[in-house]
């Protein structure tokens, strides 16, 4: 079976769209963070595929940076989750209505 | 068109299997009612995407993905899920109130991509088979090739990334504290 760059683009886009829907529709804060990680994963897939297509290693290096930033952002997002839970005693993002606290 | 071929034969089927399973795991992440199930399906999706990377001979990024994402970030997620312990939620309470609007907006989000996929022309360069292993003019491994590019051309972003990790660590520690002591 012959796989071209278009297959990679479609898979990466579908993964991104699923993560995007997850951010928009879920109520649980942790599931929203997990969907953000899905989106970053999809971007990595696209970068690696194009890096292969254009025979350029820049895409791989950028992927490593994306993974690094995702790690830092996940850590801070989870610290925010814990802090949010301590205040509101729930993980429902629809409770995040005020700017106070 | 034959220059754009990335994988053929058995590797192509393996890519198809990995891709379909990864998409299924991603849907399960979004739809699962138990956050622990979501986290475990996300872990599965990371492992499958790392497999796709290794199929493309990007072994360094595949290994980094497994170590950092599957071995670090998912462990962190599972810690927090167990700590907060939200429990299983009923399906009608799992989704936000704007679910229908989001479902309508998703095809609008999809259409420009389909247009690009249909009309965009990529440069007609052939795929060099050993591009991911070349160091200068010699063939080494993928890790050496990535290191060659990273530490020569992208040294400043590398240093900035390390400062970013320091800032993220400090931020996470401060945000996770129970009470902030007053400064006098």
Image: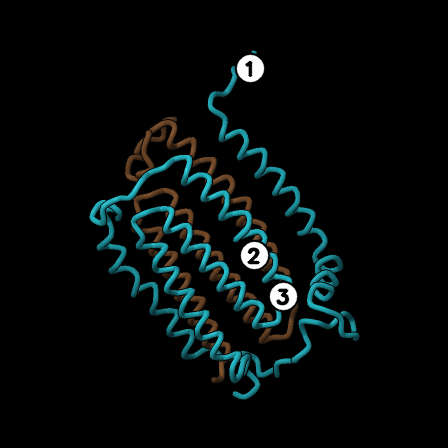
Q: Earlier in the sequence, mark 1 or mark 3?
A: 3
Task: Please determine whether, in this image, residue B51 is positioned above or below residue B7.
Answer: above
For label 1, the residue is: B183
**What is the chain identity of the residue bearing mark 1?**
B
Task: Please determine whether, in this image, residue A48 is positioned above or below residue B14.
Answer: above
Q: Which mark is residue B59?
A: 3
Q: Residues within 10 Å of mark 3 (few under 14, many from 20)?
A: many
Badge 1 element: loop
> Gap between marks 1 and 2, in whole Å?
42 Å
| Callout 1 and callout 3 share a chain | yes
For label 2, the residue is: B66
Q: How many marks?
A: 3
Residue farthest top in this picture: B184
Q: Earlier in the sequence, mark 2 or mark 3?
A: 3
Which quadrant holds residue B101? bottom left
Colour of chain A, in one word, is brown
Chain shown cyan: that is B
Q: Residue at x 70, y 59 (%)?
A: B150
Which quadrant holds residue B54? bottom right
Q: Residue at x 51, y 44 (%)?
A: A73
Of residue B27 and residue B171, the one placed in the foreground of this image is B27
Residue A5 in the image: x percent, y percent?
50, 76
Q: Is residue B64 left or right of residue A73?
A: right
| Callout 2 and callout 3 share a chain | yes
Q: Are marks 2 and 3 in contact (CB under 8 Å)?
A: no
Q: Is residue A60 left or right of residue B22?
A: right
Q: Is residue B159 left or right of residue B184?
A: right
Q: Which mark is residue A78?
A: none
Q: Residues within 10 Å of mark 2 (few under 14, many from 20)?
A: many
> Gap between marks 1 and 3, in whole Å?
49 Å
Badge 3 element: helix
**What is the chain identity of the residue bearing mark 3?**
B
């Amino acid at each position: 079976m012959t796989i071209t760059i278009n297959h990679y683009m479609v898979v990466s886009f579908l993964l991104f769209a699923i993560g995007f829907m997850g951010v928009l529709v879920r109520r649980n804060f942790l599931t929203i963070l997990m969907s953000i990680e899905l989106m970053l994963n999809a971007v990595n897939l696209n970068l690696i595929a194009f890096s292969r297509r254009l025979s350029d290693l820049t895409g791989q290096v950028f992927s490593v940076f994306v993974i690094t930033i995702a790690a830092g952002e996940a850590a801070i997002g989870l610290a925010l989750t814990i802090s949010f839970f301590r205040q509101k005693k729930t993980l429902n993002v629809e409770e995040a209505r005020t700017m106070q606290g | 068109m034959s220059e754009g071929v990335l994988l053929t034969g058995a590797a192509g089927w393996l890519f198809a299997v990995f891709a379909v399973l990864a998409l299924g795991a991603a849907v399960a992440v979004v739809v699962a009612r138990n956050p622990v199930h979501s986290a475990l399906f996300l872990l599965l999706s990371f492992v499958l995407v790392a497999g796709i990377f290794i199929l493309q001979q990007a072994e360094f990024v595949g290994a980094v993905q497994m170590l950092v994402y599957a071995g670090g970030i998912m462990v962190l997620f599972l810690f927090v899920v167990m700590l907060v312990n939200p429990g299983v939620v009923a399906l009608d309470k799992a989704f936000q109130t704007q679910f229908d609007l989001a479902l309508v907006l998703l095809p609008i989000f999809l259409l420009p991509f389909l247009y690009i996929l249909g009309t965009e022309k990529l440069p007609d360069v052939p795929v060099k088979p050993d591009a991911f292993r070349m160091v200068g003019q010699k063939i080494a491994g993928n890790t050496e090739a990535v290191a060659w590019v990273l530490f020569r051309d992208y040294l400043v972003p590398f240093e900035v990334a390390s400062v970013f990790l320091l800032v993220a660590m400090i931020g996470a520690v401060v945000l996770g504290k129970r009470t902030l002591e007053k400064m006098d």
